Image: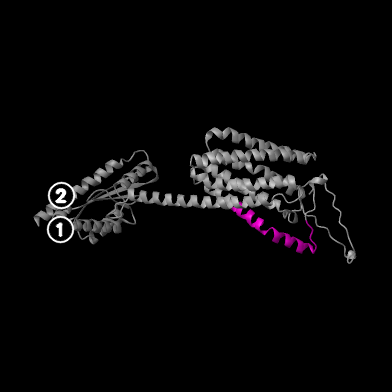
Amino acid sequence: NTMFGSLWNIIEIPREAQGKEISIVAQADLPKNNSATVSAMFGTKSAVVFNLLEMNKWYLIASIWECMLGLYLIYIAFSTNKPRALVYLGMFSVITAIWTITDTKLLQFFIGNQALIFSLSVCSFILMPVPFFLFLREVGEKNRAKLLNVICCVFMFQLFMNMAFFIFKVPIMNITFVVMHITLVISIFVGLYTFIKDGFQFRKTEIQSIAIGFGVLSIFGLVDLVNYYITPGTNNSTFFSLGLILFTLILSFGVMRRNAKLLELVTETKLLQKLAYMDSLTQLANRAAFELKMDDLKNNLKNYKTIGIVIFDLNNLKETNDRYGHHVGDTLIQDSAKRIQEAFLEIGEVFRIGGDEFAVLMADKTEQEVQDAVLKMEQNAQQNIAMGFSIADVLPKQLLDLDWLFKSADKKMYDDKAHKKSENSKV
């Protein structure tokens, strides 16, 4: 242990020392009772580094996983109804990943700057509770928000003080660590109390899995804290690191379960929306969807040059139902819907707006395109269908009345219906 925390010291043994007895003397920067030589390895530098990587591989994997989980939480935060809560939880996971990797002491072989590594380790350790308690503030009862804010401010103050002592080499780091540990213990009990009250007593299911993970982390952390004072100088973060790994695994399970529920809810919502705006007999958009589309066109008229409406009505549908039964009438409706959809699919959107009525809404289409589609539909149709359409230009200084346009097309349809009935009566 040094002023820069626990570090591995690599000592090159000269070739001329081969076969001779050597002694290595380590002088600690900190008081004797707070420093200890934990272990020693012999071999080439590459072999020693590889061995250390092998020893810490699970911590490396855990730090990568924690970082990925944190970034994922931050990513999905913006698609939920509580974005800040997930952002704070994601920040906690990312900071946890930083502390986990710095605590392995492996970065010194890649960065080389001991002061930077120590600063990252201390800063991440002190900062860890801050986003977590901000998360609790977001999901917990509001009457504890002030207390959680105070705890966060205390940790931030300790961070600044520790960094100031370190920068100016003030030798009272041990005292600040004691204060930090006391604050940490108090905050653990506040967190457990919050989780018990909100997660279980008030049955907030969204934080129950996190509460279990926090309980595991707290127990492991307290074990290491006790070990820190009983056996100073040894590795006092083994249980806490394991607790962090278990916590992130439990957190991952909770996130996956939450996402599964969100996906199920989104799927159900989309299905309900589809059913709300779809005609079950023809699978076309229904009257509600037609009204919604009309409102959308009214609100965005400036984006179009022309608007067109076509109205269709099946002649003699009532007679067909009375004579042959509703199942024959339904088949007639389905066949008509298919013919209209095939004819107008490329130039407009088809709706079933009534029992025997259909409508097509079009934007930026010419009268010739509409007539061609009508001709195609009439050639393919096997039943008597009345039709009327209106198309109008959207003028910059004159507001187009879509309700008038609909009535105009509807009137033409009824005129065509009357004309066809008259022709049939003559026949």
Q: Which amino acid is tagged 2?
A: Ala
Does any portion of residue 134 appear in the rendered image?
no
Q: Mark 1 points at which residue?
A: 324
Residue 133 percent location from the top left of the image: 59, 40
C-alpha gap between disc 1 and disc 2:
24 Å
Secondary structure category for the residue under label 1:
helix
Residue 334 percent location from the top left of the image: 25, 57
| Quadrant (top left/top right/bottom left/bottom right) for the C terminus | bottom left
Q: In this view, does 116 lie to the left or right of 348?
A: right
Q: Main secondary structure of the magenta part?
A: helix
131 or 291, which is in the foreground? 131
Looking at the rendering, the stretch of residues picked out in magenta corresponds to 39-68
Q: Which amino acid is tagged 1?
A: Tyr
Secondary structure category for the residue under label 2:
helix
Instruction: Give yes or no for residue 50 being in the magenta stretch.
Output: yes
37 or 346, which is in the foreground? 37
Q: Is residue 92 left or right of residue 257?
A: right
Q: Mark 2 points at which residue?
A: 418
Instruction: Give yes or no for residue 249 being in the magenta stretch.
Output: no
- As displayed, is residue 15 above or below residue 118? below
Q: Would you call the spot at circle 1 few (<14 residues within 10 Å), some (14-19), or many (20 or more)?
A: few
User: Which residue corresponds to the image point at 63% horizontal and 46% vertical from the top-left?
Assistant: 219
